[in-house]
Amino acid sequence: MKKAIAFFLLILGVSLYMLNSSSYSSAIKVGDKTFLIDRAGEKWDITQAVSIGFKPERFEFGLGRNAFTPLNDNFLTDPKDGTSNRMRVIGISKGHEAKAFSLRRMARHEITNSSIGGKPVAVGF
């Protein structure tokens, strides 16, 4: 009996999740502009994408602003000893300065804030 109840609750939970996580955001037209409404209710102007042939119904939901917490250099520093030659990185350089960002560390955040040559940069993955 307990297994049947647990199974029912699992199926109910999965069903509710699927109902609430549709893969399509609503698109609205306001004048000559087309907007996509993300999960947070924010409007995103997709007029240019539509003008070159993208179909609003093919867009997937947006997670909204600040969905990913960006990293900064403090969280991306790896000790030089023990670093594998096979480590996958995104590299940037300016003049004689170069930086490498570990994909393993960026995988959950997708973006990091850094600077190179005294200028701020955002590195995305």
Image (spheres, rainbow, N blue to C red):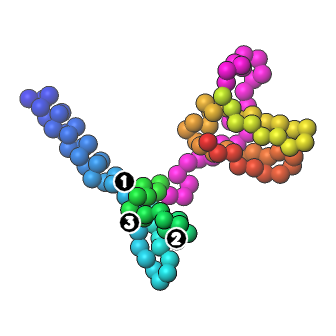
Crowdedness near tag 2: few (<14), some (14–19) or many (≥20) residues, C-alpha within 10 Å: few
Q: Secondary structure at mark 2?
A: helix
Residue drawn 79% across the image and 36% down it: 99
Is 81 magenta? The answer is yes
Residue annotated with mark 3:
26
Percent x, y for residue 124? 64, 45
Percent x, y for residue 1? 8, 29
Q: Please state if 72 lies on the left or on the right of 52 as rendered.
A: right
Q: Are marks 1 and 2 in contact (CB under 8 Å)?
A: no
| Quadrant showing the C terminus | top right
* Amino acid, disc 2: Ser
* Amino acid, disc 3: Ser
Residue annotated with mark 1:
23
Outermost residue toward the right in this view = 96
What segment is highlighted magenta in the picture?
64-87
Residue annotated with mark 2:
51
Crowdedness near tag 1: few (<14), some (14–19) or many (≥20) residues, C-alpha within 10 Å: some
Residue drawn 36% across the image and 53% down it: 23
Crowdedness near tag 3: few (<14), some (14–19) or many (≥20) residues, C-alpha within 10 Å: some
Query: Sequence order check: which comes first, mark 3 or mark 2?
Result: 3
Percent x, y for residue 89? 69, 32
Say whether residue 51 is visible: yes
Q: Secondary structure at mark 3?
A: strand
- Residue in front for this viewpoint, 60 or 9: 60
| 22 w.r.t. 44: above or below | above
Magenta span dominant secondary structure? loop
Outermost residue toward the front in this view = 53
The Cα atoms of the two marked residues, 1 and 2, are separated by: 22 Å
Is 24 magenta? The answer is no
